[in-house]
């Protein structure tokens, strides 16, 4: 009877995807092949690379060894490269934080131990079915298994297909670390001078450009797994979004709302009487349009509307506008659409509001990101579109941001997350500049926005 893994189908799929569409072959299963180091190494020695999986009641700890398991008597003391990760089930979605540690592996007949700076950070005792994790490793893996703990199963897999791209696991690991740094920075963000408690970012763009998808992407990153709160899609002529929506973002880790909100609108359309009415824009910018207002493409909102906000304060206003454009459609924008975008941008400039451009649906985001992930590299494949947008709207190149969207992903991609989080960080930076530049009379909660332009 064949030996089967304890991994669920979802867990195995997630693991394979994170490592670059590899295949896994089960070499050792402690409950079947025996609870001794000799049993494990008899099946795993000289196999490379391998993944060792330790199963707990509500999580799995894994170690990817890029080199091979040594012979039990070999004690070279040389550091090896390992990728440590956890798999945790949540709403049938697997999250996989990873990190890279250069450690020394030491093996005795009773135990396999991993050392960093001469201190044990991780060890497995098959006979006692116990595992030890240091406080540092617990913290980085976001576990609560301090000290020595019992586990239910240990499995070792040979990873096939990774040999041709050994840099991939390291790149994903480094991307995850940088993604987590961006998350930490954004969680700690506070609007300039506490003038408002929450920044409002307005998403504007043609039908199907990815406005709602961007909101879903941001929410997914902070939630820790993909989510689809905003309905996405279009039939090419009709916007799925028909209401004005003001979305708060809740941090899945700390269960608190973050100090920024994303405002989603009906998409723009080429034809008159189709899509978002451009005359609605000034009212939205000034904070006069309430959440869940039903757009009418042929009739803009007026002050006579029963829910119209007649005296919006600074917190009600739009603080940053993000023009959302499909990077694959920039060259095909109609003259009517370009005219609408210019008309809208003129109103944004009149109000002095911060603004950026989001170029969505990028397929080669792994090439767009520089090696160190610190900057987005405008690759040759996207440079032409960036320059075209710069020419159309006159927005500086450093405020034209490239992202992908989590429209069809079951697991998050750390590189894709970096693009989303970097774009969000830049929006908050330009918004802080906007708030800092506000005249003193405009920072009063009772002062109507853009009163000089009404």
Image (cartoon, rainbow, N blue to C red):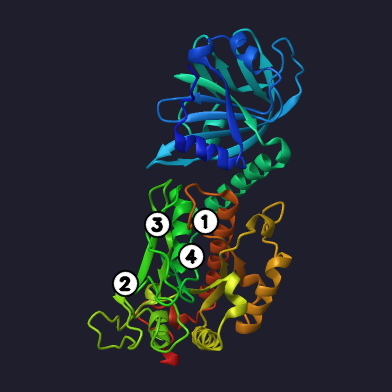
Q: Can residue 287 be seen in this view?
A: yes
Could you tell me how far apart the alpha carbons at marks 3 and 2 are, in whole angstroms? 19 Å
Q: Position of residue 285 (x, y in %)?
A: 42, 80
Asked where in the image residue 326 lies, by quadrant, the reply is bottom right
Mark 4 or 2 closer to N-term?
A: 4
Q: Mark 2 points at which residue?
A: 291
Tell me which label, 3 or 2, sits earlier in the chain: 3
Residue shown at the point (71%, 38%) measured from the top left: 166
The Cα atoms of the two marked residues, 2 and 1, are separated by 25 Å
Q: Which of marks 2 and 1 is nearer the N terminus?
A: 1
Q: Which of marks 4 and 3 is nearer the N terminus?
A: 4
Q: In this view, does 81 lie to the left or right of 215?
A: right
Numbered circle sitting on residue 191? 4
Q: What element carries label 1?
A: helix
Task: Say few, some or many: other residues with alpha carbon within 10 Å of mark 4 (under 14 / 14 to 19 / 20 or more).
Answer: some
> Which of pointers 2 and 1 indicates the residue nearer the eye?
2
Q: Nearer the viewer, mark 3 or mark 2?
A: 3
Mark 2 residue element: loop
Question: If you read the primary sequence from the N terminus, does the residue marked by circle 1 or circle 4 appear first?
Answer: 1
Residue occupied by mark 3: 228
Q: Is residue 124 left or right of residue 7?
A: right
Between the residue at mark 1 and the residue at mark 3, the CA separation in whole angstroms equals 21 Å
Q: How far apart are marks 4 and 3 (CA)?
A: 27 Å
Mark 3 lies on a secondary structure that is loop
- Between the residue at mark 1 and the residue at mark 4, the CA separation in whole angstroms equals 11 Å
Contact (Cβ within 8 Å) of mark 2 with mark 1:
no
Secondary structure state at the residue bearing disc 4:
loop
Nearer-N-terminus badge (1/3): 1
Task: Give the residue at mark 1.
Answer: 186
| Residue placed most toward the observer, 142 or 213 | 213
Whether tag 3 and tag 2 are in contact, CB under 8 A, the answer is: no
């Amino acid at each position: 009877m064949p030996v089967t893994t304890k991994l669920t189908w979802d867990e195995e799929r997630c693991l394979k995807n994170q490592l670059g569409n590899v295949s896994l072959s089960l070499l050792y299963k402690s409950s079947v092949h025996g609870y001794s180091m000799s049993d494990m190494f008899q099946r795993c020695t000289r196999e490379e690379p391998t993944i060792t999986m330790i199963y707990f009641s509500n999580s799995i700890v894994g170690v990817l060894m890029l080199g091979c398991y040594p012979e039990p008597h070999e004690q070279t003391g040389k550091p090896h490269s390992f990728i440590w990760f956890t798999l945790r089930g949540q709403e049938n979605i697997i999250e996989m934080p990873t990190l890279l540690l250069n450690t020394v592996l030491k093996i005795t007949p009773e135990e396999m131990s991993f050392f960093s700076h001469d201190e044990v950070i991780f060890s497995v005792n098959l006979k006692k079915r116990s595992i030890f994790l240091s406080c540092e490793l617990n913290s980085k893996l976001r576990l609560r298994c301090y000290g020595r703990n019992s586990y239910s199963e240990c499995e070792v897999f040979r990873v096939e297909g990774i040999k041709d791209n050994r840099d991939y696991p390291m790149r994903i690991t480094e991307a995850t670390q940088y993604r987590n740094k961006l998350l930490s920075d954004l969680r700690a963000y506070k609007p300039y001078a506490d003038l408002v408690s929450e920044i409002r970012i307005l998403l504007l763009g043609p039908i199907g450009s990815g406005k709602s998808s961007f909101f879903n992407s941001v929410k997914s990153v902070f939630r820790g797994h993909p989510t689809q709160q905003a309905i996405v899609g279009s039939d090419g002529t009709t916007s799925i979004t028909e209401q004005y929506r003001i979305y708060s973002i809740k941090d899945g880790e700390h269960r608190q709302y973050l100090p920024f909100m994303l405002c989603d609108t009906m998409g723009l359309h080429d034809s008159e009487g189709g899509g978002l009415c451009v005359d609605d824009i000034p009212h939205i910018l000034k904070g006069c349009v309430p959440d869940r207002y039903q757009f009418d493409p042929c009739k803009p909102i007026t002050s006579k509307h029963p829910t119209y906000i007649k005296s919006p304060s600074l917190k009600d206003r739009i603080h940053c506008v993000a023009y959302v454009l499909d990077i694959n459609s920039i060259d095909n924008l109609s003259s009517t659409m370009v005219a609408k975008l210019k008309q809208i941008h003129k109103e944004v400039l009149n109000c002095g509001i911060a603004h950026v451009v989001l170029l969505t649906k990028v397929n080669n985001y792994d090439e767009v990101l520089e090696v160190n992930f610190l900057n987005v590299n405008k690759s040759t494949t996207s440079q032409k579109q960036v320059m075209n947008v710069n020419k159309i709207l006159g927005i500086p190149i450093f405020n034209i941001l490239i992202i992908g969207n989590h429209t069809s992903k079951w697991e998050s991609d750390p590189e894709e997350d970096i693009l989303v989080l970097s774009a969000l960080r830049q929006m908050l930076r330009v918004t802080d500049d906007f708030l800092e530049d506000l005249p003193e009379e405009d920072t009063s909660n009772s002062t109507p926005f853009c009163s000089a332009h009404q």
